[in-house]
Amino acid sequence: MTASKNRAAWWRRFLGISPNGYHEALEVLRGRYIEERQHAMRFTQHAQGMQYPQFRERLLQIASEEADHAESIAKEIRHLGGTLPEVPAVPVTEKNSWEYLLADLDEEVRCADEALEQILTIQSEFPQAAELLERIRGDGEKHRDGIREMLMKSDPQALWPT
């Protein structure tokens, strides 16, 4: 075990990667992995509570994409020599369809802001990981647009002029 740690440290020095940058990048990726896995669980739960089948299908599609994101992040974590963190379960909540969608949109907006900071943090030493997070952030933008559209279609007040 010590030999593999020494070898990893040697490679980091050889590649010009600081130990703090390496650990910070792994922490960023582990955090994003947890969030993407939890998003997939939450979207799946919320899809089950959707009144409209087209909304259910769209949320399940988003859940699948979030699961794919988590798997891509897992590969990057393993590539860097890290281990995957445990993912806490997402608590089940009872809300109506509109409240689920609103909560999903809020979470996606929060994650987008956080992702931008994370990308900037790791970009110089880990451009491949930063590029992965940027692609995920782009998918998140599409998810937010889709959720906004569902919110507008599910809120009868949204269609009426005020």
Image: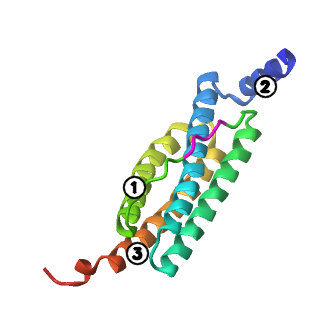
The disc, 3 or 1, on the residue closer to the chain's N-terminal end is 1
Q: Is residue 56 left or right of residue 9?
A: left
Question: Does residue 117 belong to the magenta stretch?
Answer: no
Mark 2 crowdedness (10 Å alpha carbons): few <14, some 14-19, many ≥20: some
Q: Could you tell me how far apart the alpha carbons at marks 3 and 2 are, in whole angstroms?
A: 47 Å
The disc, 3 or 2, on the residue closer to the chain's N-terminal end is 2
Residue carrying label 1:
109
The disc, 1 or 2, on the residue closer to the chain's N-terminal end is 2
Above-or-below relation of 84 to 97: above
Q: In the image, residue 17 lies at what x, y percent?
A: 66, 28
Residue flagged by tag 1: what amino acid is it?
A: Val
Residue flagged by tag 3: what amino acid is it?
A: Met
Which type of secondary structure does the marked residue at label 1 adopt? helix
Q: Who's the residue at 57% across and 30% down the image? A: 24
Furthest residue toward bottom: 160
Q: Quadrant of residue 98?
A: bottom left
Mark 3 crowdedness (10 Å alpha carbons): few <14, some 14-19, many ≥20: many
Indicate which disc residue 8 carries.
2
Furthest residue toward top: 2
Residue carrying label 3:
150
Q: Write down the region rendered in magenta.
A: 85-89
